[in-house]
Image (cartoon, helix red, strand yellow):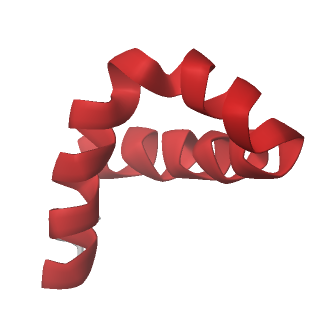
Amino acid sequence: MGKPPLPFTRIRKNYIIIQNERYIVSIRYNNTFCAIYCQWGRMEKNWIQ
C-alpha cells in the first residue's frame, strides 16, 4: 500500500517510541487501551508490507 497520511505518520513515530512501554501502559489504561494498541499493530504490519 502507499504511504499513510501525515497525521498517521506522526502517530506512527509516537507508537514506535511508546512501544517499549506498551505493557506498562496497557496495565495502566486497562484492556480498552490495549485493544487500541492491537489495532495499531495490525496497521503497522500493513504499512511495512
For this orientation, the residue located farthest to the front is: 28
- Residue 18 in the image: state x and y as whole percent: 33, 34
| Between 16 and 27, the one nearer to me in the picture | 27
Q: Is residue 23 left or right of residue 11?
A: right
Quarter of the image where the N terminus is located: bottom left
Residue in the image at 27% along x and 63% along y: 11
Residue in the image at 21% along x and 33% along y: 17
The answer to whether residue 5 of the structure is visible from this angle is no
Is 32 rendered above or below residue 41?
below
Residue in the image at 77% along x and 46% along y: 35
The answer to whether residue 43 of the structure is visible from this angle is yes
Is 36 rendered above or below residue 21?
below
Q: Is residue 19 left or right of residue 16?
A: right
- Residue 20 in the image: state x and y as whole percent: 36, 16
| Between 44 and 18, the one nearer to me in the picture | 18
Q: Is residue 32 left or right of residue 38?
A: right
- Residue 25 in the image: state x and y as whole percent: 58, 31
| Between 42 and 7, the one nearer to me in the picture | 7
- Residue 37 in the image: state x and y as whole percent: 60, 44
Q: Could you say which quadrant of the image residue 29 lies in?
A: top right
Is 19 rendered above or below residue 34?
above
Quarter of the image where the C terminus is located: top left
Looking at the rendered structure, the number of numbered marks drawn on it comes to: 0
Residue in the image at 71% along x and 49% along y: 33
Q: Could you say which quadrant of the image residue 2 lies in?
A: bottom left
